[in-house]
Image (cartoon, grey):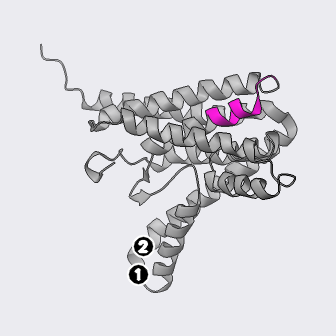
Amino acid sequence: MGDGDAPPALAYDVAVPLIAANGALDAYTFLAHDGVFATAQTGNVVLFAIGLVRPAVAAPLPHLWPILAFVAGIAVARSLHSPAAPEGQRRSRRWVLAVQVVALVVIAIFSSALPLWVIVSVISFLSALQLALFRKVAAITWVPIAMTGNLMRTTEAVHAVVTGDRDTRRPAAAQLALIVVFVAGVVLGAVTTTLLGGRAAFVPAALIAADLAWIVSRGAVHRHRTVPPATP
């Protein structure tokens, strides 16, 4: 995806619930579904590889399904991608979030009946689609589903501030705040999964649904303000 057709940046108020929901999802699948990560594929790759050598420590197959689903999601996103106007990309975002909400509600309701590989594969596949459409928050390059790259960029920004670059203070503070949001989402997911078990999938579903409603309402307000008055 080139810079010319990159997805529009997210506003902070839209990004925060989404980032928190992704943190909650990783805690949910890790605690409720045999130590498998929903979106942190680095963790799944490491545990899969360990499982090949020491299956008693980490069974490899449960960690393989989300990896394959994530790869499939990225492939589908690339196959469907074409340069589009910002409004078309915003519409695609809304559809992806809507499908995520529906999928998570179904998982919450039928979590005890659905096989593990189905649950984690669906979540990972949709996370990959989300990754293809959400790449920036304001002026910050930011991946909402994993923290490794975000930690690197945040550390670089903080280092720049410490070494005297005052222009990086605001983005560094914003990046630190977004990491805190992700951690808070993980804590929320851990608490609710401990209390609710498989039904805790309702929590990230509610966060994403609220975010989607806010995105739609913002778009409606924007259209209302930009529509010219009718001529007599």
Above or below: residue 232 compared with residue 28: above
Label pair 2/1, CB-CB below 8 angstroms: yes
In this rendering, the count of numbered labels is: 2
Name the residue tied to disc 1.
165
Which residue is the extreme one toward the left? 232
Mark 2 crowd level (few <14, some 14–19, many ≥20, 10 Å Cα)? some
Residue 146 seen in this snapshot: yes
Question: For the point 79% across and 47% down, which residue is it?
Answer: 190
| Amino acid marked by disc 1 | Asp
| Amino acid marked by disc 2 | Thr
Question: Which structural element holds mark 1?
Answer: loop
Which stretch is magenta? 113-122
Question: Which structural element holds mark 2?
Answer: helix
Name the residue tied to disc 2.
168
Circle number at residue 175 = none
127 to the left or right of 194: left
- Distance between mark 2 and mark 1 Cα atoms: 6 Å
Camera-side residue of 2 and 117: 117
145 to the left or right of 93: right
Quadrant showing the C terminus: top left
Mark 1 crowd level (few <14, some 14–19, many ≥20, 10 Å Cα)? few
Question: For the point 86% across and 38% down, which residue is it?
Answer: 195
Task: Name the spot of residue 84 as percent of width and height, x first.
Answer: 27, 36
Which image quarter: residue 53?
A: bottom right
Above or below: residue 1 compared with residue 178: above
Which residue is the extreme one toward the top? 232
Task: Name the spot of residue 59 as percent of width and height, x first.
Answer: 80, 47
Question: For the point 64% across and 59% down, which residue is it?
Answer: 180
Residue 21 seen in this snapshot: no
Question: For the point 49% across and 75% down, which residue is it?
Answer: 156
Task: Name the spot of residue 157 as percent of width and height, x first.
Answer: 47, 73
